[in-house]
Image: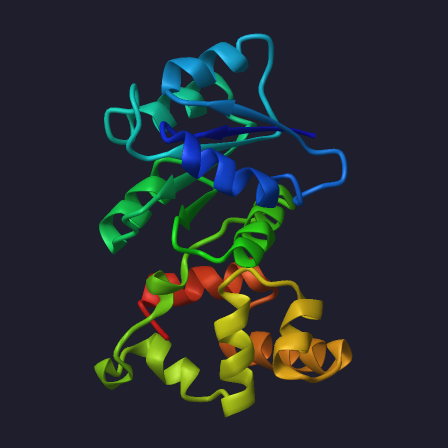
Amino acid sequence: MRIILADDHVMIREGLRPFVERIAADAIVQEAGSLPDVLALVKDGPADLVILDLKMPGMSGFQGLVTLRQMYPQMRCVMLSAVADRDHVLEAIRLGADGFIPKHLSGAAMVSALQLVLSGERFIPAMMVERNKADGDEGGDLIGKLTPRERDILRLLREGLPNKVIANRLEVSEVTVKSHLGNVFRKLGVQNRLQAMRLLVDSEAF
């Protein structure tokens, strides 16, 4: 598996690389410090995953993302940024990003998020599914149907954590987590993790 880690700060790349290498046993990580460097690396063919720093030479906002999506529409692309405000995240997803990774995300959560992306789903940071419960919109009504334990699981789910890690965090069995998730999906009217996250983002719930 070929992964390109692009950030103009060497220290950031060195800090993230050990975690990126944990995504898969056969992960080969190539580093880039600018968009032109990324384009040079994919010249002979797309990578399995590209992690793009939002603010590095050649990016021009989201133009770098747009360029890569046009050239390699099947290549998985994730944005990396120290600033993960709502507008940036929504714009990145709208333009085709498969995920948005805040630099403050823990290493373990980042690994899980990237694995989720490689499985074909999108990763949206937790801040996108947070809201004031007093808003009282449809999403809030749905969340109100969940038990405290189901809400705990949903909070961990939005971090991209697999069932085994969620089970360890909550000190319950993986079977219990799966059972609670089944109830969550049923109450939200969705079929899987991705649909649940999309529902919460669309409604600005949780």
Q: Nearer the viewer, residue 135 or 116?
A: 116
The answer to whether residue 145 of the structure is visible from this angle is yes
Q: Nearer the viewer, residue 8 or 87?
A: 8
Residue visible at 59% across and 45% down in the picture = 19
Q: Quadrant of the C terminus?
A: bottom left
Q: Is residue 110 above or below residue 32?
A: below
Q: Quadrant of the N terminus?
A: top right
Q: Is residue 118 above or below residue 131?
A: above
Left or right: where 9 falls relative to 153: left
Left or right: where 48 falls relative to 176: left
Could you tell me residue 174's position as x and y percent?
74, 76
Could you tell me residue 93's position as x and y percent?
38, 43
Which of the 4 quarters of the picture holds residue 144? bottom left
Which colour style is shown?
rainbow
The answer to whether residue 189 of the structure is visible from this angle is no
Q: How many marks?
A: 0
Which of the 4 quarters of the picture holds residue 56? top left
Q: Nearer the viewer, residue 113 or 104?
A: 104
Could you tell me residue 158's position as x and y percent?
49, 65
Could you tell me residue 79's position as x and y percent?
40, 39
Residue visible at 58% across and 74% down in the picture = 185
Q: Is residue 55 above or below residue 132?
A: above
Q: Is residue 35 above or below residue 48?
A: above
Residue visible at 43% across and 15% down in the picture = 37
Residue visible at 31% across and 67% down in the picture = 204
